[in-house]
Amino acid sequence: MKKTLYLFCFLFFFCFVSTSAQSHKLLFETPYGNFKVLLYDFTPNHRDLILNAIKTDVYQNALFNRVIENFVVQGGEHDIDIEKREAADPMGHKPRLSAEFDQRAYHKMGALGAGRDNNLEKASFLNQIYFVVGKPITESELDALEQKKKLVYTAEQRTYYLQNGGQPRLDNDFTVFGEVYEGLDVLINMSKTKTDKGDFPIKKIPFQITEIKE
């Protein structure tokens, strides 16, 4: 019980620090419950992309369609559908949004990221998002990732990952542009849903997004 209380206090502290200077927040409504997300102003292109998507109903009738426990909950346009659509385009268009990497935006529990394919620029899909549900991380794992990825985790990143877990192996490969600041338990519960061999939830998980006006 004490460990659980400490974890949520720690998460609240980091959320408070991160959210204090940001200007846009979103509400996600799902059958599992609702959760709230902060968008980072220091990843402005991805922030504006999803804000515009909300205004133009891009995520109307959207689903969380790829769920992997201890990894991610992914929604919006699926990789398979993107590949089919782009393959059918006679002009061969593959629209992407350039990556926005920032040391303040990393794959902590509840991080909001943009999906992508294997393009060399690490540019993001326009209509696919994911949330990190993560797993415990050890110091030796972080050390190995620093060697492999040729990066150095900040003191904040290292402290957070060791205390709470996440998915640091995705850092500097996928753009993180926000984080859950309320209702993380909803996502964790969702990540445990039954799926088929392709990680599709057996029972559909629709979601709606609205911007929180304060």
Image (cartoon, rainbow, N blue to C red):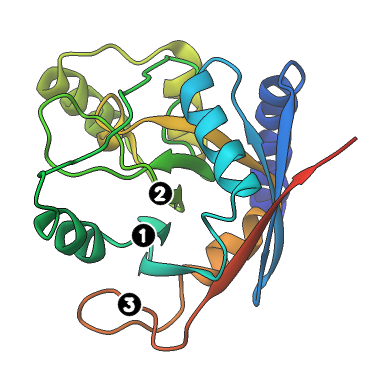
Image quadrant occupied by the N terminus: bottom right
Foreground of the two, 17 or 116: 116
Specify which label sits upstream in the sequence, 2 or 1.
Answer: 1
Mark 1: secondary structure: loop
Foreground of the two, 60 or 120: 60
Q: Is residue 211 visible?
A: yes
Query: Which residue is most to the right?
Result: 214
Residue at 56% over, 34% down: 178
Foreground of the two, 4 or 131: 131
Q: Are marks 2 and 1 in contact (CB under 8 Å)?
A: yes
Give the quarter of the image for residue 165.
top left
Residue at 59% over, 55% down: 57
Please name the residue that numbered disc 3 is placed on. Answer: 200
Q: In the rendered view, tell whether residue 65 sits above or below residue 161.
A: below
- Per the model, the C-alpha gap separating discs 2 and 1 is 6 Å
Please name the residue that numbered disc 2 is placed on. Answer: 127
Q: Are marks 2 and 3 in contact (CB under 8 Å)?
A: no
Q: Is residue 144 left or right of residue 114?
A: left
Please name the residue that numbered disc 1 is placed on. Answer: 77
